Image (spheres, rainbow, N blue to C red):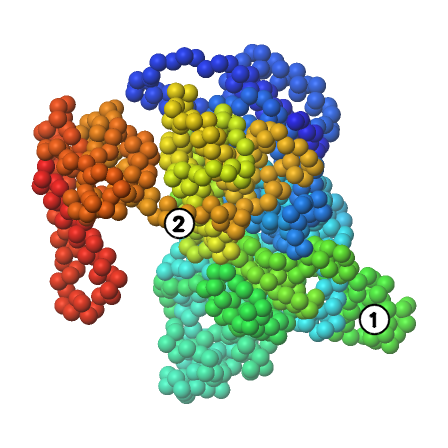
Amino acid sequence: MWRSACGLSVRAAERAIHRQCSRRLYAHNAEKPPPQSTPRTQAEKERRRRDKEEAILSSQHNWSIDALALWQHSLAKLIPLLLFTIPCLDTTLPFPSSYSPEYVETSWYPWWEKEGFFTPEINDRLPHAVNRSFSMCIPPPNVTGTLHLGHALTVAIEDALVRRKRMQGYKVVWVPGCDHAGIATQTVVERRLFRERGKRRQDLSREEFLKEVWTWKKEKGEEIYHQLRELGASLDWSRACFTMDPGFSSAVTEAFVRLCDSGLIYRSEGLVNWSCALESAISDIEVDSKQLSGRTLLSVPGYQNRVEFGTMVTFSYPIDGQDGEVAVSTTRPETMLGDVAIAVHPEDPRYQAIHGKQCRHPFADRLLPIITDTMVDMELGTGAVKVTPAHDHTDFLLSQRHSLPRLTVIGGDGTMTPLCGQWLEGVKRFDAREQVIDALTEKMLFRGKRDHAMSLPVCSRSGDVIEPLLKKQWFVRCGEMAQRAIQAVDEGQLEIIPHFYTKTWSSWLSNISDWCISRQLWWGHQIPAYRVTLSDSTDTQEELWVWGRSEEEARERAAGKYGVTADAFTLTQDPDVLDTWFSSGLFPFAMLGWPQQTSDLRQFYPNTILETGSDLIFFWVARMVMLGTELTGQLPFKQVLLHSLVRDKHGRKMSKSLGNVIDPLDVISGISLERLQEKVEEGNLDPRESMVAMEAQRKDFPKGIPECGTDALRFALCSYKAQGEDISLSVSQVLSCRHFCNKMWQTVRFTLGYPAAPLNELTSPLNSMDQWVCSRLYSTVLQCEQGFERYELHSVTAALHSFWLHSLCDIYLECIKPVLSQDSVHTGREKQVVRAVLYHCVSVSLALLSPFMPFLTEELWQRLYLLRGEGGDSAGASLCLQPYPQSSQLAHWHFPQEEADFTLVQEVVRVARSLRAQCGMTKEKPDMWAVCSPSQAQILVHFGPAVRTLGRITKLHLHCPQGAGSLSFPSAPPPPKGSAVGVVDHSCQLHLNVQGGVNVSKLSHQLSQRREKLLSRLEQSLSRTRVPNYLQKVPERVRIETENKIREVKAKKKAILAK
């Protein structure tokens, strides 16, 4: 059953050969017969446990000399080949004794991809195909970096949804993509250029720099796709798109031209959020607000020393022509060089006498009019406000209302402009701040400085303090589009899940500003707009603009618009590029070929659903809805599913400076503490932050991160409630899921020892335990359906985990082991039924788990597949294309009464084990008496073998003090006196004969402790019934529950007293 895989890179070759060799060693060891061992002592078990943990935590492989030689020989032979094939896992080899993620997860993905299982075209080969489609795009990660756990959560959720739909017979397309990440990519390449060649971007031409970026992209761009494959994402790689691909770039140009033609994109001068570090504008939602309670020193890009913020400076302007002054307060004294007026509230009594007068600027020697405006807050500072229209949003509005000039005194590079005078020209803005304060002090105009709580705008991209600057930019009018987006949700055309985000959606879009889409970068989609310079024009200030899909089209538009011939003007394309989020906003339809009317666009647009992190609801989701509706006339998707953010186990936001950022591949493959620390040292953190990060790693991962595997990571991520509060992920939770993977492995290994025919071929009736486990499986399938329907994947994983671990392993397997044993007295037919039920439960459960654990379930299912000896088309030879189980197909195996009755059995078993442990009879299988009601006795007889096997008792005597005549069997005598008693509920007690071999003193102490706890619980319950108007205030349902608890506690107390 060897299958060839797709070609891989040389780097992947080393890893694959390494794993292949280790697999062969693994399989070779598996063939050795297990030694005949005696029962291990507790000390030996503990030693073996520690050895296993050390093996898991270790990042080194203990190769034998032969194995190392084999690996080196294979590597030397295969590395020269750029393309080669790796065989899919040979499931005919002996089944290894324990689960290994590396063994399982190596070769299935290349086979899946090579066979085309992830393309929608595979649907034509499925016998259970339905005439429905399911389409979705992955939020395109930045081409710059590597995936983090937030990406892993996105992949885990989306792939679970996609794989289930594919198994249900839908025609599925899940499109991968990468975002060119204009700011981030340009920053990375600029740093590399300076580090390796000592050059800055400005030392190269635009074409030369872009060539460097494309070279870097070719080297690093595939890393993201490699990681997505490692995570098992069943993406259709034949449709992968990059936002700078020619086809996608054409879609961006088309969108810009259409929006310009409709008047939704315009060019205007306005205040933009400017990052001096990037020398580019950024959008409102890329600005973070840092709350300061007072004086704070912060690191700012470009400054060696920390800069002071969170203070309010007060200084005075002398009133021109008379004695007196006007004191103003500001948190940004360096901007006073751009002041053009002083504003006061018209009703402020302190300034009534100076309305209409002027103050003289101490450095620029210009007059500043004193204006009145109700926008001024009389309670803030001195009540008088300096007006700097070119550097403050509120002041810009004041300048429009009062026709004030706008003076730019801080340039795009963050230095002071020539308008400030020679003494400040070229000085960095925050250095100029101190010089301005010194100059004001020298002129005796400085009036003081105090702490001031404030919100500091910070660029989320660069960490720079935002500087509002006056720039001519391209803007998108968002008002009408935003209203349509609100209306779509209000009218139910677009559903946002969880629904509580609906209010946030409406509130934000109702107050949206126009979107500045110009970015002063070289990497990105250059704006397809051209400045027209008329040959005979003498007005150099007026800007004339046209736009077009090409320069030729723009030239035609210019000639027609300005009524001139083609040789009467020149065109100069805008050097700026479009905001990355503009191109990302087109992803749902541009990825399908828009603006061309492709078959993919007709079939898969609108997308079925968009799933992404809740932090992108405004960055990306709202813009996709607005642009998609405007450009295609349709909503880009019908549903939006938002998941929470992933935090560390302490609830902290993941940050490189905190040392808590975890690479999902490190969780999958494992990593030593030393390598984790090396990664921090290789990063861009300053020495102090590196020390903090490395110390945090030593505390959180003292032995590194153990190898957990992809399946365990995916299952753990989907096990958290993703809709609501942020997820505090712990590696120990992932490791717990790895142990669950091993439990699955051992269960299938046990199952393979007992070949069986399919369950539906049986004609004889099932016994009680067979009916119970089949019914539990039906209920689990139903829970999965309901969970997927509500997108509550945590409830799906919880149901599957509970069924496999508890219902199947802890209960059913333990019950059938005596049946399947060689010395069993059960008939061959009974054994056949049990084997068929076991096979049925395992195979259906594997299908249910497949969307969450694709590698492990494929491996285990293939083993069962060989057991059946079935063949056929390759599309039917993979679990990922098998029909997903449906509750309607299993309804005939639903026995609700069996499930309801078995809860009593579970309680009886729990109490029986507890009694045996209390009495120190863990190795014995004693007799027990159950004093219970007739109905309970009937249930215990019905499940008699299960009670005896799970409770580890030889015989259960059933004594019914009342109603024994209604029994179909004789009631047993009362239990012996002096028995240890355990309470199941108020009507059922278990009695264990403890004559001989029991430590009476120890047992008495335990009973005394239990009695004290019961008395406390009883008093708590009784106190609730003593509140005034208890019967009137408390619902009947709650009263009944309380009464039952009181009755149960009293019965337990009585049982203890009887001992």
Q: Is residue 59 visible?
A: no
Which kind of residue does numbered mark 2 sit on? Pro
Q: Write the residue at 48% across / 14% down.
A: 33
At which x and y percent is residue 800? 45, 43
- Lower position in the chain sequence, tag 2 or tag 1: 1
Crowdedness near tag 1: few (<14), some (14–19) or many (≥20) residues, C-alpha within 10 Å: many
At which x and y percent is residue 82? 73, 28
Secondary structure type for disc 1 = helix
Left or right of 545 in this view: 103: left
Which kind of residue does numbered mark 1 sit on? Ala
Secondary structure type for disc 2 = helix
Q: Write the residue at 22% across / 38% down.
A: 970
Tell me, for residue 558, which label it has, or none: 1
At which x and y percent is residue 858? 57, 35
Separation of residues labelled 2 and 1 (CA atoms): 77 Å
Tell me, for residue 896, which label it has, or none: 2
Q: Nearer the viewer, residue 522 or 421?
A: 522
Labelled pair 2, 1 in contact (Cβ < 8 Å): no
Q: Nearer the viewer, residue 50 or 999?
A: 999
Q: Nearer the viewer, residue 431 or 1018?
A: 1018
